């Protein structure tokens, strides 16, 4: 199983760059991702700096959407990262969920927009001469990328059925949004399987990956409390879909999510987590002591998932850097063995 680690954009950029340099020593680390989240630190700036201090791991944005920047600009940024990193760039795409009201944006037809973003990006990377692309959501007229770029692997992050289907048909890899077991993972894999026969035959076989909220600690309870905080991220954008596929979310939590601002304070997050079912927490997190995390990841691997992109959460009373060291020295090493 390949391991990737994600930076959310909420940490000091100089510290992130230094940590990325240190993390590359872990032989089981394959990817470093930077999220494009609300109005946190700019991901492309951080990715460029990370490219300059690393030499082995792949690096990419996880994820960006086709609305806040024109997809041609995103394709050019990814191609620049590919050039700077010596061919290690990845492009993570998805529907997005944050910052749109402040920008005066009303996203429409996200599955169609991501489809067109993928098509235009690949054309920009491959077409040496001027061309036009006219989609339902995206227009690019009589121009081209002004420098050469090799193809860049595209990951599509998805929880909803339409986006999962887009990933199965067009992406190099599908990044399943935080389902690690149970009815959520069953639903996601079933949706992918149903769409995969329509996959472009010129593409390589689809790789299956999962975006996961993870915490590991010798104190299993502390790890579970830490990882459960990731569910707050999932609920903000996916509470309707989670209820549609069968998860029970208390009515007062749904009402709070619908009416609340984007950022929740620590007390609000703790209240939300305390009201959720254990089934939902277990199905959307990997948490516990090292042996428990290894067992859960092995089960995920048995379902055909060969890569994880981890958003790390410190266990209760701990810190995230110590937790990540434990992840790579105990969990990732055990899975590799």
Image (cartoon, rainbow, N blue to C red):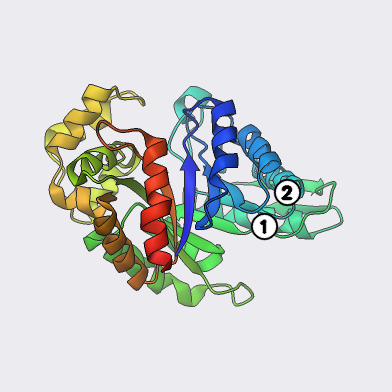
Name the residue at 80% across, 59% down. Answer: 127
Graded by Cα atoms within 10 Å as few (under 14), some (14 to 19) or many (20 or more), the crowding at tag 2 reads many
- The residue identified by callout 2 is 79
Q: Position of residue 56 (x, y in %)?
A: 64, 54
Q: Earlier in the sequence, mark 1 or mark 2?
A: 2
Q: CA distance from mark 1 to mark 2?
A: 8 Å
Graded by Cα atoms within 10 Å as few (under 14), some (14 to 19) or many (20 or more), the crowding at tag 1 reads many
Q: Position of residue 44 (x, y in %)?
A: 63, 36
Please, is residue 269 above or below residue 311 in the view? above
**Mark identifier at residue 227:** none
Kind of element beneath mark 2: helix
Kind of element beneath mark 1: loop
Name the residue at 77% across, 52% down. Answer: 132
Q: Position of residue 172 (x, y in %)?
A: 56, 64
Decide: marks 1, 2 in contact (CB < 8 A)?
yes
Name the residue at 68% across, 52% down. Answer: 134
Please, is residue 151 above or below residue 258 in the view? below
Quarter holding the N terminus is: bottom left
Within the image, what quadrant is residue 123 found in? Answer: bottom right
Along the horizontal axis of the image, is 325 left or right of 290?
right
Along the horizontal axis of the image, is 164 left or right of 232?
right
Within the image, what quadrant is residue 306 found in? Answer: bottom left
**Mark identifier at residue 152:** 1
């Amino acid at each position: 199983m390949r391991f990737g680690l994600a930076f959310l954009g909420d940490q000091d950029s100089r510290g992130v760059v230094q940590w990325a340099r240190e993390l590359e020593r872990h032989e089981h680390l394959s990817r470093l991702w930077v999220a494009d989240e609300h109005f946190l630190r700019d991901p492309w700036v951080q990715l460029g700096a990370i490219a300059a201090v690393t030499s082995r791991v792949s690096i990419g944005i996880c994820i960006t959407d086709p609305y806040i920047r024109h997809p041609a600009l995103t394709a050019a940024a990814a191609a620049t990262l590919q050039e700077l990193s010596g061919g290690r760039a990845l492009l993570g795409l998805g529907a997005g969920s944050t910052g749109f009201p402040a920008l005066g944006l009303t996203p429409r037809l996200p599955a169609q927009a991501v489809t067109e973003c993928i098509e235009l990006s690949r054309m920009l990377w491959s077409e040496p001469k001027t061309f036009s692309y006219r989609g339902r959501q995206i227009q690019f007229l009589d121009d081209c990328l002004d420098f050469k770029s090799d193809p860049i692997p595209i990951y599509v992050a998805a929880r909803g059925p339409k986006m999962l289907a887009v990933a199965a048909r067009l992406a190099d890899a599908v990044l399943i949004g935080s389902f690690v077991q149970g009815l959520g993972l069953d639903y996601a894999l079933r949706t992918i399987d149903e769409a995969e026969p329509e996959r472009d035959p010129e593409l390589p076989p689809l790789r299956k990956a999962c975006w996961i909220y993870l915490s590991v600690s010798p104190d299993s309870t502390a790890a579970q409390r830490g990882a459960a905080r990731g569910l707050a991220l999932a609920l903000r954008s996916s509470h309707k879909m989670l209820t549609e596929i069968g998860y029970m979310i208390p009515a007062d939590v749904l009402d709070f999510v619908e009416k609340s601002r984007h950022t929740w304070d620590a007390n609000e997050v703790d209240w939300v987590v305390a009201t959720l079912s254990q089934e939902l927490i277990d199905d959307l997190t990997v948490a516990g002591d090292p042996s428990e995390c290894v067992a859960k990841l092995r089960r995920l691997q048995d379902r055909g998932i060969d890569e994880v992109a981890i958003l790390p959460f410190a266990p209760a009373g701990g810190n995230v850097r110590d937790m990540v060291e434990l992840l790579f020295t105990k969990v990732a090493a055990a899975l590799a063995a």
